[in-house]
Amino acid sequence: MRASFTFFGLLLAAFLALLAPAAPALARYGALPRSMGQPLNILLAGVTPKYPPSAIWPYPAAPEDFTGLTDTIMLAQIHPDGAVKLLSVPRDSWVEIPGVGMSKINASNARGGPELLMQTVGDLTGLEIDGYALLSLHAVRSMTDAAGGVTVEVKQPMKYDDNAGNLHIDLQPGVQRLNGEQMEGFLRFRKDNLSDIGRIGRQQQFVGAFTEQMKQPLNWWRWPVVAGALNANTKSDLTRGEVGAVLAAALHGPKVNTFMVPGDFGARGTWAVDHAALRELVQREFSAGSQGRAQPASGDHDVQTAALDTEMAITILNVGAPAGSAGRLADALRAQGFSNLTVGNGQGPLAVTQIQGPAAEQVQDLLNFGEADTAPNPDGSDLVIRLGADVPLP
């Protein structure tokens, strides 16, 4: 199973893909974007809630301590040029857990914490893992609501009720915008022929939809709220330098390729890993993996500031975009550190946004829409952005 989609922030992967000016969560790391000398392997896992033995119906979950089973397991390999590869590991993969024996891989965290989970995934793939990020059950719900909902395609009716776990799923087929509670059900639903493998496909669909939505400049104002939601629902051992390296990758606006551990349905609801096919996949796609904790390359710098002059004079004119678009874009650019901004209206209509000035191509890469013209502007502005009908809706 493989998919490829444009990637702006590593907002799945996991909680780190937030540009520094808009991310109060980074205060706990004090991190700025940094280059890195080699690929970084980060283990991402979603932890299921635990219920105290003394609980009575409706069985409220115990306070999150990140020691439960892992419902979602992904290995993210982040390269210095911004390329990202995600390897999904089915939770029911039947593997050797060091010190435990043969078991489903999702028991690793519950038996020995994230360190044992990293060791198990490392032994399975042959890759050395640099660090981990655990997400609580509420992470997806909180980040989806913080993003204003996320649009996905529900491909079949989903109906399931678990009163004990307070999980209720009722979704009909079609493309629709789901809120946090609905998205949690969409991602956790297993009552179909594909079970966990179907869940992995939906997880990858969510990643693509969420990042595609959040990379749009008119949604940048939501980043601080998303960052806070993720920060409150994660546990990680990543160092300040590693967080900075992930941020640098996010700023490159790379593409992500997603893969899944190959295998087939086994006995007792397990996933029988095809180890030969997995070795071939890792050798082909992940062979340049990390050899240990990555060290920042020399000449570390703020990638965004180096790429663009945040003091240049920028004029934003709404020519054919929805009302308020120029102001929203100005707010988003201010969040990125740009300070010399002028907002106004122009005469239209205009179908495609026009970005004019010596830095037009770089700004086009940042905005991810419009056409670039590097010719100087006659009005003296360093950059003029004429917003057209192609501006994404907030």
Image (cartoon, helix red, strand yellow):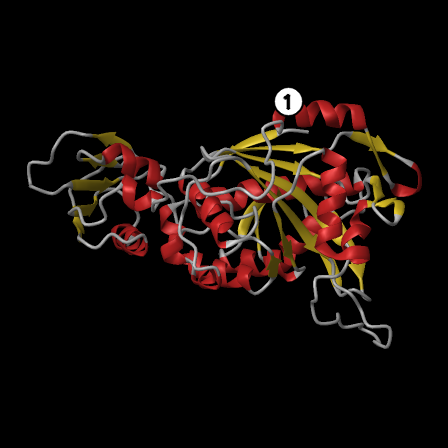
Instruction: Give coordinates of residue 31: x percent, y percent.
Output: 43, 55
Q: Viewer-proximal residue, 214 or 259?
A: 259
Q: Viewer-proximal residue, 158 or 102?
A: 102
**What residue is disc 1 on?**
284
Which image quarter is the N terminus in? top right
**Residue 17 in view (yes/no):** no
Looking at the image, the residue that sits furthest to the right is: 267
Q: How many marks?
A: 1
Instruction: Give coordinates of residue 287: x percent, y percent.
Output: 62, 27
User: Which residue corresponds to the image point at 40% horizontal and 42% vertical from the top-left?
Assistant: 251
Secondary structure, mark 1, is helix
Left or right of 325? Residue 62 is right
Left or right of 116? Residue 17 is left
Instruction: Give coordinates of residue 356: x percent, y percent.
Output: 19, 35
User: Which residue corresponds to the image point at 93% horizontal and 38% vertical from the top-left?
Assistant: 267
Identify the amino acid type marked 1.
Arg
User: Which residue corresponds to the image point at 54% horizontal and 50% vertical from the top-left?
Assistant: 150
**Residue 211 in view (yes/no):** yes
Instruction: Give coordinates of residue 64: x percent, y percent.
Output: 69, 67
Residue 77 vs 111, above or below: the answer is: above
Q: Quadrant of residue 114?
A: bottom right
